[in-house]
């Protein structure tokens, strides 16, 4: 069952493109990654999903229902963390959570569990929010978004400001939600994060979806990286067939390799090679390939 169904979604801010002709679906029990740099259209898409913006064209269905028709129904089932989470600064954290919980019909059944997993202390909880660090405020936002055990969590850059240990705890929380049949829509520009927790990913570039695939299948389809280290530095980087130069640091050259490698290997034989590596493709390689300037 598709929990999110987006078809041909387009949004302009007057003449400025937000997103254009965006289509994707997210299945129940899936952790779906929405990947792109700042300004690519991630937050615009999320605000449309949350009905904070209205599209110029296209349709959105959540839990099989178009959001225009039954907004209260779907909002009761969602947990949302905005990318610019700015809670009431004068409130202590505990008062903020209790205050916001009054506007939900679902009880905050997971609050204490999340407080414990994210190592949110009672002292931090009693402080005014404006005195909390950015990372601690972000932990509060995660608890706010998930404490009512939503069927769908829409999280916009959720690990911003979190230290590595808390990030790991957050990933464990996501995996527990997934095991319970919950669905997570995770927007991020952090490549290792998306690769670690997501099964499928959509890559958005300049407001348009440029890839939508399982991460493992993307790795199989996209170019592989080649790293060549020469015994000494030469005047010009080697031009290799079926390879595109990415960077050159001293006598170390990185390429994306596409197509048949037979000619490439013949060219490599002629070089004074000290070391050569074909690392396994990762999401960063895929991302760089889509954002390297090629429109294909």
Image (tube, rainbow, N blue to C red):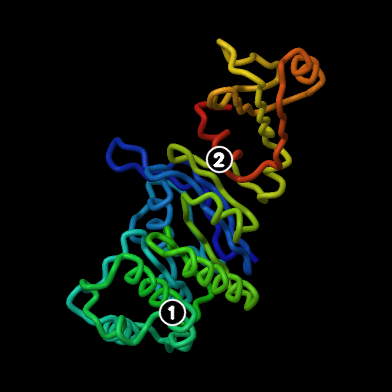
Secondary structure beneath label 1: loop
According to the picture, the residue beneath numbered tag 2 turns out to be: 287
Which residue is farthest left? 90
Q: Quadrant of residue 160?
A: bottom left
Q: Tell how many labels.
A: 2
As drawn, 265 above or below 176: above
Q: Position of residue 137 (x, y in %)?
A: 32, 70
Q: Residue at x 43, y 50 (%)?
A: 42
Which residue is farthest top? 235
As drawn, 135 above or below 283: below
- The quarter in which the C terminus is drawn is top right
Report, in whole angstroms, how far the alpha carbon at label 1 lies from the one at label 2: 33 Å
Q: Nearer the viewer, mark 1 or mark 2?
A: 1
Secondary structure beneath label 2: helix
As drawn, 148 above or below 62: below
Q: Position of residue 118 (x, y in %)?
A: 45, 76
Q: Residue at x 27, y 66 (%)?
A: 86
Which residue is farthest front? 231
Report the side of 104 relative to 270 (left or right). left
Between discs 1 and 2, the one toward the N terminus: 1
Residue 58's disc number:
none
- Estimate how packed mark 1 is, as few (under 14), some (14 to 19) or many (20 or more) residues with alpha carbons within 10 Å: some
Q: Position of residue 212 (x, y in %)?
A: 61, 46
According to the picture, the residue beneath numbered tag 1 turns out to be: 119
- The quarter in which the N terminus is drawn is bottom right
> Is disc 1 in contact with disc 2, using a CB cutoff of under 8 Å?
no
| Nearer to the camera, 194 or 3 | 194
Q: Quadrant of residue 240?
A: top right
Q: Residue at x 54, y 36 (%)?
A: 288
As drawn, 175 above or below 44: below
Report the side of 270 relative to 115 (left or right). right
């Amino acid at each position: 069952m598709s929990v999110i169904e987006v078809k041909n979604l387009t949004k302009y801010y007057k003449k400025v493109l937000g997103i254009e002709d965006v289509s994707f679906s997210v299945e129940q029990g899936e952790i779906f990654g929405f990947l792109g740099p700042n300004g690519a259209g991630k937050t615009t898409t999320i605000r449309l999903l949350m009905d904070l913006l209205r599209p110029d064209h296209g349709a959105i269905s959540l839990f099989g229902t178009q959001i225009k028709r039954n907004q209260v129904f779907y909002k009761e089932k969602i947990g949302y963390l905005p990318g610019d989470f700015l809670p009431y600064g004068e409130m202590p954290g505990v008062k903020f959570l209790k205050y916001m919980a009054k506007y939900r019909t679902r009880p905050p059944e997971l609050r204490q569990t999340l407080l414990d997993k994210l190592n949110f202390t009672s002292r931090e909880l009693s402080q005014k929010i404006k005195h909390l660090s950015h990372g601690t405020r972000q932990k509060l936002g995660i608890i706010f978004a998930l404490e009512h055990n939503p069927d769908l969590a829409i999280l916009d850059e959720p690990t911003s400001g979190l230290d590595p240990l808390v990030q790991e705890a957050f990933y464990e929380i996501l995996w527990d939600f997934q095991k319970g049949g919950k669905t997570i829509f995770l927007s991020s520009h952090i490549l290792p994060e998306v690769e670690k927790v997501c099964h499928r990913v959509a890559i958005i570039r300049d407001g348009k979806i440029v890839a939508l695939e399982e991460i493992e299948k993307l790795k199989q389809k996209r170019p592989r990286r080649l790293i060549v280290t020469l015994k000494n530095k030469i005047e010009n980087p080697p031009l290799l067939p079926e390879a595109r130069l990415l960077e050159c640091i001293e006598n170390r050259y990185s390429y994306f390799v596409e197509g048949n490698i037979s000619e490439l290997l013949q060219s490599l034989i002629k070089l004074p090679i000290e070391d050569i590596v074909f690392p396994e493709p990762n999401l960063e390689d895929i991302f760089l390939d889509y954002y390297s300037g090629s429109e294909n």
